[in-house]
Image (cartoon, rainbow, N blue to C red):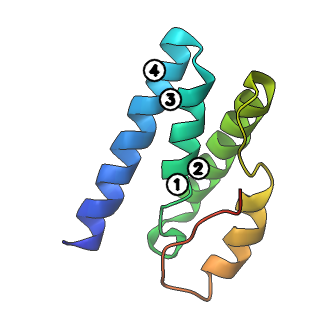
Amino acid sequence: MDASIEQNRLLAGVLMHVSRYLDTGCPRAAHQAGLLLRCLDTSTMDEELMSSCEQLDQAISHACHAGGASAGSDAWTSIQSRSRTSATSFSFPN
């Protein structure tokens, strides 16, 4: 499958779960959005999208911790610097 199509599907999934979280307050929806967000390949993102994803990850992580779910809250920053040298997708430690 084309990598850009996969990226678009992941972003659509993130938006779907974030929307569910905003509508229902369900911490699991925020957690699921965070999991998908962390599957994105940052080497293909422009700076604006990467910044938006970082902000969303921080908000989701805060929501997950407040709701009792677990997510790697500070991992985006550390993985962001690695993404500049790696063309592979990444995952955050849980």
Which label's residue is closer to the chain start, 3 or 2? 3
Name the quadrant containing residue 74: bottom right
Please name the residue that numbered disc 1 is placed on: 49
Which label's residue is closer to the chain start, 1 or 3? 3
Q: CA distance from mark 1 to mark 3?
A: 16 Å
In the picture, the quarter occupied by the C terminus is bottom right
User: Dot 3 lies on which element?
Assistant: helix
Q: CA distance from mark 4 to mark 1?
A: 21 Å
Q: CA distance from mark 3 to mark 4?
A: 5 Å
Q: Where's residue 30, x and y in %? A: 58, 31
For the point 76% across and 28% down, the residue is: 68
Q: Which mark's residue is nearer the viewer, 1 or 2?
A: 2
Please name the residue that numbered disc 2 is placed on: 53
Q: CA distance from mark 1 to mark 2?
A: 6 Å
User: Dot 4 lies on which element?
Assistant: helix
Q: CA distance from mark 3 to mark 2?
A: 12 Å
Which label's residue is closer to the chain start, 2 or 4? 4
Cβ–Cβ under 8 Å for marks 4 and 1: no
Q: Which mark's residue is nearer the viewer, 2 or 4?
A: 4
In the picture, the quarter occupied by the N terminus is bottom left
Cβ–Cβ under 8 Å for marks 3 and 4: yes
